[in-house]
Image (tube, rainbow, N blue to C red):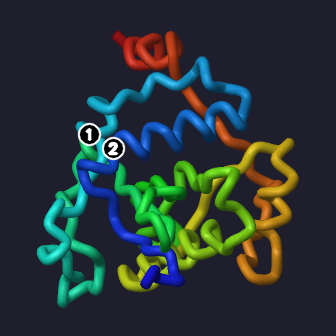
Amino acid sequence: MASTAPVVRHARREDVPAILGLIRELADYEHALDSVEATEATLAATIAFAPSDPSVVSPNPETGLPITEPVSPSKPARCLVLTDPDSGVVVGMALYFYNYSTWRARPGIFLEDLYVKQSERKKGYGKRLLVELAKEVEAMKGGRLEWNVLKWNEPSIKFYESEAIGAQMMSEWVGMRVDGEGLPKLAKLLD
């Protein structure tokens, strides 16, 4: 008998090919497939994974947070995956890392990418991933869960601003980024 609920869990090393596939699908949706530099090797080296043996996975009794490999400057990300209840195939992900609010003096989570396969939308899977992240923020006594969304992505904006999710657009903030050739240039600015 098949399960009726999807399973959300922290990614394991064996999920890397599925994660890369979802990243590529997301990039294609955002018209930026040529910008994807991620490979299975780079993802494996930069995501903190849960153990492959499911019997080992249990929450830390002190924090309630899942036990995964420790995060570090070279392995800063974690990833939740959502599997189809019937096939067990990974059909969604929430790739995230921890951040910090100086004004609140509390940790938080920055959601780098949330993606559910086109064929699996309208089943509550995106909401389920966001709920699990919110639970993790609450368990660590965090202050916020935040993410960015492309201005043209109206379906996602409407979903995030819906009463169920309750996200608020931060129109007073402008995102800033230094990457590509600008990063080494900035790093050497005062040399």
Q: Which mark is residue 16?
A: 2
Asked whether residue 31 is in view, the answer is yes
Q: Which residue is mark 1?
A: 44
Name the residue located 75 percent from the left edge and 77 percent from the top edge: 166
Secondary structure type for disc 1? helix
Q: Is residue 10 left or right of residue 1?
A: left
Relative vertical location of residue 64 with respect to residue 149 in this rendering, above or below: below
User: Quarter of the image containing the N terminus?
Assistant: bottom left
Specify few, some or many for label 2: CA neighbours under 10 Å numbering under 14, 14-19, or 20 or more. some
Task: Nearest to the eye among marks 2 and 1: give it.
Answer: 2
Q: Nearer the viewer, residue 46 or 33?
A: 33
- The three-letter amino acid code for the residue at tag 2 is Val
- Assess disc 1: are there few (<14), some (14-19) or many (≥20) residues with their C-alpha within 10 Å of its C-alpha: some
Asked if labels 1 and 2 touch by Cβ distance under 8 angstroms, the answer is yes
Residue 113 left/right relative to 59: right
Q: Farthest residue to the bottom: give it.
A: 61
Q: Nearer the viewer, residue 93 or 106?
A: 93
State which quadrant residue 79 falls in.
Answer: bottom left
Q: Position of residue 64 (x, y in %)?
A: 28, 86
First reached walking from the N terminus: tag 2 or tag 1: 2
- State the separation of the CA atoms marked 2 and 1: 7 Å
Q: Position of residue 55 (x, y in %)?
A: 14, 77
Please name the amino acid that badge 1 sits on. Ala
The picture places residue 185, in percent across and down from the top left corner, at 46, 11
Write the residue at 18% across / 89% down.
61
**View extreme (front): residue:** 1
Whether residue 160 sits left or right of residue 16 in the image: it is: right
Which of the 4 image quarters holds residue 169?
A: bottom right
Q: Position of residue 54 (x, y in %)?
A: 19, 72
9 over 174 or under it: above or below? below
